[in-house]
Image (tube, rainbow, N blue to C red):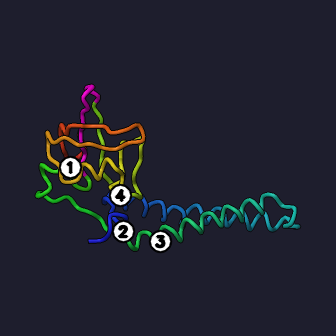
Amino acid sequence: MKSSNHLITRKGRSKLENELDYLWRTERRAVTQSVTEAAAHGDRSENAEYKEGKRRLREIDRRIRFLRKRLDVLEIVYYSPQQEGKVFFGAWVELENEDGEIVHYRIVGSDEFDPHKNAISINSPMAKALIGKAVDDEVAVITPEGKKEWVINSIHYKPVD
C-alpha cells in the first residue's frame, strides 16, 4: 500500500479527473482562443487582454501538470466489509464530547479534505486518533486549544442522510 499521502476515494479521484478534463478540453481552449484574438490586435507589450490571457494560460498549464502527476500516484481505497465496526479510510464518523456537542467527519485523502463538508484528511490529528477505533471508544485529540476528548457514536461507510 502507498503512503497515506497518496490515498483517495473513488469520488475524489473522479473530481480530480473531471477538473483535469475541463481544464484541458474547455478552459485551456477558450483561453488560447482569446489570447490568439488579443494577439491579432497588434502591440502585445501594451495589450492587457493578451497579458492576462497568457498569465491565465500559465496557471492552467501549471494545474494540468500537477493533476497529471498527482493522478499517476494516487491509489483509490475501496470499501471492504472487513472495515465494518471500525474507523478506517473513507468512514463517516459521529463523535460526541462531554458537553453533548456532536460532530460528523469523513476521513479522506489529503487531495479531497474539505472543512466545509466535514471531510478531514487521513493525516489530521483527529483522523489519526480515530483510525482503528470502534463505536463507544474514547478518543483524545491534542488541539491548539488543548486536549479534547470524544466518544464515537457511530461509524458508517455510506453517506447518512
Q: CA distance from mark 3 to mark 4?
A: 17 Å
* The quarter of the displayed image where residue 160 is located: top left
The residue pinned by badge 4 equals 109
Q: CA distance from mark 2 to mark 3?
A: 10 Å
The residue pinned by badge 3 equals 68
- Under circle 3, the secondary element is helix
* Sequence order check, earlier mark of 4 and 1: 4
Q: Disc 3 residue type?
A: Arg
The answer to which of 27 and 157 lies nearer the viewer is: 157
Q: Disc 1 residue type?
A: Tyr
Up-down relation of residue 137 to residue 11 (above or below): above
Is mark 3 in CB contact (under 8 Å) with mark 1?
no
Q: With 115 as the anchor, is 92 left or right in this view?
A: left
Can you name the residue that lies furthest to the top here? Answer: 99
Label 1 crowd bin: few (<14), some (14–19), many (20+), radius 10 Å = many
Q: CA distance from mark 3 to mark 1?
A: 28 Å
Q: Position of residue 11 (x, y in %)?
A: 33, 56
Label 2 crowd bin: few (<14), some (14–19), many (20+), radius 10 Å = some
* Sequence order check, earlier mark of 2 and 3: 3
* Sequence order check, earlier mark of 3 and 4: 3
The residue pinned by badge 2 equals 74
Residue depth check, mark 4 versus mark 1: number of the one nearer the observer: 4
- Under circle 2, the secondary element is loop
Is mark 3 in CB contact (under 8 Å) with mark 4?
no
Q: Position of residue 59 (x, y in %)?
A: 62, 63
Q: Position of residue 113 (x, y in %)?
A: 39, 51
Query: Which disc is residue 157 wearing?
Result: 1
Label 3 crowd bin: few (<14), some (14–19), many (20+), radius 10 Å = few
Q: Which residues are magenta?
A: 91-101
Q: Disc 4 residue type?
A: Gly
Q: CA distance from mark 2 to mark 4?
A: 9 Å
Q: Position of residue 62 (x, y in %)?
A: 58, 68
